[in-house]
Amino acid sequence: MVKVIDIEEFLKLQNDDKLPVIDVRSPIEYNHAHIPNAHNVYLFSDDERKDVGTIYKQIGRKEAVLRGLEYVSVRMTDILKSIDNISKEYNSNNKILLHCFRGGMRSESVGWLCSSYGYDVYLLRGGYKRYRNYVLGSFNKDYRIYLLTGRTGSGKTLILNKLKSLGYNVVDLEKIAKHKGSAFGWINEGEQPTQEQFENNISYELSKYDTNSIIWIEDESLLIGKRAIPKDLFNRMQSAEKIIYLDIPKECRAQYITDTYGKYSIDDLKESIIKIRKRLGGERMKESLELLDNGKIYECVLNMLYYYDKAYRLSINEDNLVTIECKDNNIDDIVKLIINRI
C-alpha cells in the first residue's frame, strides 16, 4: 500500500506513532538539511543524481529515466535491506514514512519498491520542499515565552537545564546551534549545523509544545555563532510574556566562565579574545591576552566582562520583568527563587 499524505499527518505519524522517516534524496541534499531523525537511504548518489539531471535537461525525460533505472537496478536489494535495518529499530508494523525533494519520481519509485516488498508506505505530498514551508510557518505561532536573561556568565543554560529536569518546557537554542553564544562559545562544540538544519531543529523542538504551554527560552542575540534565530521567533522572544532577569555579581559570573572554559586550550581562548578585539578595544585586548599568558584566567575573564557588561542592554517592558537578585551563582538556589517568583 502506498498513500500520499499531507505534512501535518506525516509529522504526526513520525512523532506520535514513532514511524521511521526515510529520506531518499542524495547524500549532499540530506547532509545540507533534513527532517530531524530522518534516515538517508538515497535512490541516487550525488554523482548519479547530477548525471540523471543533466540528461533530463539536455536530452529528455525518457533518456533520464532509463539512465536512472540503470543506476537503481543494481541497488534495489541494498535499498530494501537498509530500510529493513532501520525499520527493526522501530515498532512500526512494517509502516514507513518516505519523501524526496518535491514528492516526485524518486519517492514514488522507492515507495512502489517498498510496497511491493510488503511495506505500508506513506509518501509526503510535496516532499521536503513542503516540509520547509511548514518549518518557516511554524515560527509565526503565538508561543507563550518566558525569556531568561542576564549578563554574560549568569549560567542561564544550566538554569534552563535544571528547569527542564523539573518538568518545565525548555527550548535550548544554544544547544541546537552548537554554540554557547559568547566569545568562547564555539570551543569544544564541533561544527555548527547549516542555517537550514538549525531552523528545522528549532521547529522540531517547538513542535513538542502547544501554543497554550509556557516555553522557557534563553535571551539571545539574533546570531548564535554564525546561525541566525528565525526573525519571527526572535521577534516573539523580544515580546515575551515574562522576562526573568538574573542579577548575579560580576565576580561570581567571572568564576563561572573560568570554571567552564578554563580547562580548554589557551590557544583557543586567545583566538576567541582576538576575534572580538574591535569590541574590546586594543588596550583591553592586550591586557586580557597578557593575563591569559600569565595563567590568570579568572583575572582575564573579569577584565573582559567590563566590555560585556557595558554592551549589555535590558530594553524591555518592565511590566513583564521579574528581577531575581542572587548573592551567588548556586543553580539550585536560583531556580528556587525563580519558581517562587513566577
Image (cartoon, rainbow, N blue to C red):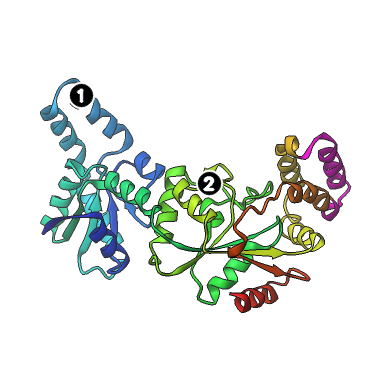
- Position of residue 166 measured from the top left corner of the image (x, y, whole percent): 54, 77
Q: Distance between the residues labelled 2 and 1?
A: 35 Å
Q: Which of 237 and 138 is in front in this view?
A: 237
- Position of residue 242 measured from the top left corner of the image (x, y, whole percent): 56, 65
Q: Determine which of the numbered discs, if any, sits on residue 57 in the image.
A: 1
**32 vs 309: above or below:** above
- Is 222 on the left or on the right of 274, as rendered? left
Q: Element at badge 1? A: helix
Q: Which of 80 and 288 is in front in this view?
A: 288
- Position of residue 312 measured from the top left corner of the image (x, y, whole percent): 70, 50
Question: Crowding near pointer 2: few (<14 within 10 Å), some, many (20+)?
Answer: some
As shown in the figure, which amino acid type bears the numbered disc 1?
A: Lys
As shown in the figure, which amino acid type bears the numbered disc 2?
A: Gln
The chief SS type of the magenta part is helix
Image: magenta residue range: 280-299
Q: Determine which of the numbered discs, if any, sits on residue 192 in the image.
A: 2
Q: Nearer the viewer, residue 74 or 192?
A: 192
Q: Element at badge 2? A: loop
Please tell me which of labels 2 and 1 falls first in the chain.
Answer: 1
Give the residue furthest to the top: 58
* Position of the C terminus by quadrant: bottom right
**Magenta stretch holds residue 83:** no
- Is 239 on the left or on the right of 295, as rendered? left
